[in-house]
Every structure is written in structure tokens, then in C-alpha cells.
Amino acid sequence: MKWFERKFDFSFGMEQFEPLMARLRNGPAAFASVVETIPADVLETKPDGKWSIKEHIGHIFVLEPLWQIRFDDIRNNKPVMTPADLNNRATDEGGFNAVHIDELLERLRQERSRTIALLSSLGGNDFNGVSLHPRLQKEMRVIDLMYFVAEHDDHHLNAIQNISATERN
């Protein structure tokens, strides 16, 4: 399913905080594990002109600062979250195929660690805020955005696995 076609159910509560933190913490390791045995030429292959595996990983870490801003938007009850660039210009222009995979994974680890540090610093009333997601047109809490980010990771992990499977056959 295409990411922009996904629908989200945010009917869970704070009991999902620790499981979602674990998913987010594990994100960089999950990407590293998936790509560790993929040959370099496959990492840079752009199937049907779409993103390569390296570009998928680059996309994940270029979005981390947006996630951090959006967590602050929610915490501060900003009426509408900071919008994303739905054209993904930073990914398309990132030149990620020219960067070694280990460096891309390190950038992802660094950016995600900032997100984890921000989430770890939250407490009390920080979890009561809401902000409208501009594309989904749904109000989101911190816990909802955590789920959204974790699902976004999984979406791109699946895309990477599909590229790898297709290119190896």
C-alpha cells in the first residue's frame, strides 16, 4: 500500500509508550540488519526510477528533524503541525547513492537518537497536547505521532526488502 493511502487508527493509549519507544529505538538497527548482506550495486539500484535502498534510508533520516519539530508542536498545542514537504525534495536531491551505506546508517542512528532523547525528556502535561496533522486532517497526540513514525519506518523497511528480493532474483 502506498504511504499516502494509509489510514491510521489512534484509539490506543499511553500503555503503548514503551513498546513504541522500543520500535523507534530499534529502527536504525533494523535498517542496518536488512541492508548488511545486500550488494553495493543493489543498494543503488533505482527500480522503475523510484528510490534506491540508500535513498530510502536517506529519506528516513532527513525526516527526523521534522518528527522532532512535530513532537514539539504537539507538546505546545500548536493548532496545526509543521507541514512536511510532500514532494520529498530533500530525499530526491540528497545524493544518497554517492554516500557509503555505513555513513547513511550512522546519520540515521544520530538523528534517531535525537528523537529518542526528546521523547525521553517528555513528561506529565507534555502528553496532553494535540496538533492537527495537515495531510491526515486528524489531531494527533505524542503517542500517535510515535506510532506514525514507527509505521513509516516499517513502510520503508518493507520497500527495501522488496527491492532487495526483486533485484536478487
Image: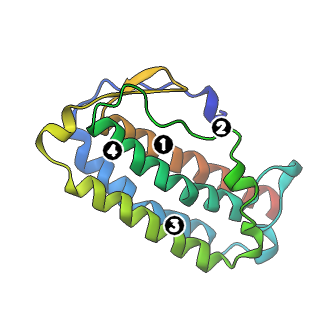
Mark 2 vs mark 1: in front: 2
Position of residue 33 in the picture relative to residue 17 (left or right): right
Camera-nearest residue between 31 and 61: 61
> What residue is disc 3 on?
108
Camera-nearest residue between 142 and 168: 142
> What residue is disc 1 on?
151
Disc ID at residue 72: 4
Position of residue 98 in the picture relative to residue 125 (left or right): right
Identify the residue at horizontal 37%, vertical 66% (top origin): 113
Tell me the distance, in whole angstroms, between the alpha carbons under discs 4 and 3: 20 Å
Q: Is residue 5 above or below residue 92?
A: above
Identify the residue at horizontal 43%, vertical 33% (top origin): 81
Tell me the distance, in whole angstroms, between the alpha carbons under discs 4 and 2: 20 Å
Residue 102 horizontal/vertical position (percent)? 60, 79
**Which mark is first along the chain, 1 or 4?**
4
Outermost residue to the left? 124
